[in-house]
Amino acid sequence: MSDAVQTQSTPNAGFTPRVFSGIQPTGNLHLGNYLGALKRFADAQNKGIQSIYCMVDLHAITVWQDPADLARATRELCAGFIAAGIDPEKSILFNQSQVPEHTQLAWIFNCVARLGWMQRMTQFKDKAGKNAQNASLGLLAYPALMAADILVYHATHVPVGEDQKQHLELTRDIAIKFNHDYGVDFFPITEPVIEGAATRVMSFRDGTKKMSKSDPSDMSRINLTDDADAIAKKIRKAKTDPEPLPDSIEGLEDRPEARNLVNIYAALADLTPEQVIAEHAGQQFGAFKPALADLAVAKLAPISTEMSRLMQDQGEIDSILRRGADRAREIATPILQKTYDITGMIRS
């Protein structure tokens, strides 16, 4: 928690439960995106809480993007959402730049957030590197836009990975400070949702590093565009250790590659890691990997096939995004207008 004022005692009383999450469209969706986000989104959309999912293309350009690649990646991400089970009729699915209320609220939040808060963000330090003076202003202000993405819908819950918890803390700080500064209870204090066996999927080459599309080795990850043969091959060749699977979850301590594969199996099969260990205790990886490969192919190959089909009709994808943006604006516009009223902006 930063040095913002303290959280109100019942921060979200009176707010309609609503889920928001966004993913950057920077290409090469992989297993980590599926297990850490897309699968969870699909599982959650039937629980009766309105869900809003966004391709955050404005965040993507905090570092330079080739325009054609960005457009393709945005459509591919939309296809990935749908292929993974997100129904654009049940959930709201759109790309960020089609809803200008995000950037309009972000400017107000730029004036609420403190410079020191932004400079402490771990991701800014990591991405800016040693020469922060050459980083874009957008990279520094990224968390204020992320806060606007969430709060322009009064979202009460956000599914996040461990690496995004700091940004959500900042969103909460901004909401608290805005409410305090203007003497209102207008923005909810959004709660993180972190759950599941594989919210942080690790590399097949190094179990201590997160699975990433930027890894130079394609064998380090399963891409959602991989076919069945590629999926099975990557799992067979995933780094492991010579020991068999233990008879308790504690036995995976200090065995990062083994734990990663157990977690992946558990997440794909909707089991706990403890249940996977109970079923496969004593097995060598020569037996466990084929079982995991069969499971992964059964779950992931249909997604790859459906993504390919969807990408053949870009007009339909654009239509889905446009309809989603219209629905998103129906929620965002009155919230932004009320924000303007609170801050003293005159509207005709």
Image (cartoon, rainbow, N blue to C red):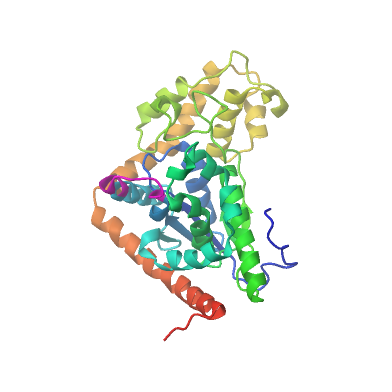
Residue 190 in sight here:
no
Name of the residue lying farthest toward the top: 242
Residue 333 in sight here:
yes
Report the span colored magenta.
60-70
Q: Is residue 93 left or right of residue 207?
A: left
Q: Position of residue 152 (x, y in %)?
A: 51, 67
- Residue 279 in the image: above or below residue 66: above
Of the pair 236 and 56, the residue shown nearer to us: 56
Q: Position of residue 124 (x, y in %)?
A: 52, 45
Residue at x 45%, y 19% (from the top left corner):
237
Say which quarter of the image contains residue 231.
Answer: top left
Of the pair 29 and 228, the residue shown nearer to us: 29
Residue at x 46%, y 34% (from the top left corner):
212
Q: Position of residue 308 (x, y in %)?
A: 29, 43
Q: Is residue 306 left or right of residue 133?
A: left
Magenta run includes residue 52: no
Of the pair 329 and 251, the residue shown nearer to us: 329
Name of the residue lying farthest toward the bottom: 348
Magenta run includes residue 65: yes
Q: Is residue 49 left or right of residue 228?
A: right
Q: Position of residue 156 (x, y in %)?
A: 60, 63
- How many callouts does the rendering have? 0
Name of the residue lying farthest toward the front: 133
- Residue 205 in the image: above or below residue 47: above
Give the quarter of the figure containing the C terminus.
bottom left
- Residue 248 in the image: above or below residue 181: above
